[in-house]
Image: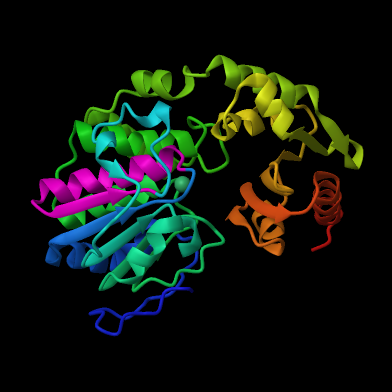
Amino acid sequence: MIIALISSSPFPSPGRRGPRGEAEYTGIIAQIAECLRAADNLAILSHQQPDGDAIGSSLGLWWALTKMGKQVQVACPDPVPHKYQFLPGAEKVVTELHQAPQVAVAVDTDGWARLGQLQPVVQRAKITILIDHHSTNSGGADLDYVDPSAAAAAVQVYYLLGPLGVELDAQIATCLYCGLATDTGFFTFQNTSAPALQVAAELVRAGADPYQIAQRVSGQLSIPAAILRGQALASIRTAAGGRIVYATLRPRDFAAAGARPEDTEGVIDVLKSVAGAEVVILFKADNHRHCQVSLRSRGIDVASIAAQFGGGGHPVAAGLQMPGPLPMVTVKIIKAIEQALNGGA
Ligand SMILES: [Mn+2]
């Protein structure tokens, strides 16, 4: 995409593959493992507004490479959210990279733009590697391991451990379990599969503590975040005869609750519990006539709807940003979803 392919790359770019599971990816996994084994100066990167998978898969890979004796930096354009700071190694995550690494590995990252201020440094790396599971990711690194059938990027990192010759331990397992558990809604979302549960079992066997991790991640709602959640629920409206359920948060709601932008995490999952809702939407307006739109679906592919407006994600969970006043954004998005629900594009 944005990054020019580096001609010195030792491997041809394999391009994108269909969602056929781990076996389909054995070749690219081996190539990536070989490249990582050969490198000694690496950086691991993940996306803006990091979630549990961004941080968990980054740190899981960071531990693995560090245990191999590599010099590894781990960076994210935004700081590690409070609820993921319990993860081993979380204090190692930096928001700036001053030196270009030999090998840059982006995990859970759907497009280079999502690396924010880290993007220029990544462009100077000799080799770029992409490990991601977003269905809208079209690759573009020297080595692309894009598997939309993987429940989390953490699962993809898990599949790399064997070829890397790294033994799974409690530190790696805790980080990867956090990524897998959060991306599957603690094993309740559509991406919860037998392979995902099998990997989870291995991680627990190696020392990840499901109860502790769930407590640290889910039992941490702050009072401002709880109040903001109430405001979002009070704003609920429906469209398409109840098949679309949406909520709206304006800057004044954040101010009244004393909440921060990241305090909306989890709100959309509450909307999803409304009976009859096929698509749920959370509209977040900022002070600069910009809206952030989060989409969740029980049926139609919301990633392709998000892509129509320059966003992306997974078929059942996607997002986008759009300029313009909130009422206009709301009308545009709902119209596109209604069309999709009626069998249109
Ligand atoms: Mn993910």
Is 64 part of what is drawn in magenta? yes
Report the front residue among 131 and 49: 49
Please report the residue visible at 34 percent of the width from the left and 65 percent of the height from the top.
122
Q: Residue furthest right?
A: 241
Residue 271 vs residue 217: left or right? Answer: right
Residue 329 vs residue 105: left or right? Answer: right
Q: Is residue 132 visible?
A: no
Report the front residue among 102 and 17: 102
Q: Position of residue 141 (x, y in %)?
A: 38, 71
Please report the residue visible at 41 percent of the width from the left and 49 percent of the height from the top.
77
Q: Residue furthest left?
A: 69
User: Residue 7: which quarter of the image?
Assistant: bottom left
Please report the residue visible at 47 percent of the width from the left and 18 percent of the height from the top.
220
Q: Is residue 147 above or below residue 244?
A: below
Q: How is the image coloured?
A: rainbow
User: Residue 28: which quarter of the image?
Assistant: bottom left
Please report the residue visible at 21 percent of the width from the left and 33 percent of the height from the top.
171
Q: Position of residue 250 (x, y in %)?
A: 74, 34
Q: Residue furthest bottom?
A: 7
The magenta segment is 50-76
Quadrant location, the C terminus: bottom right
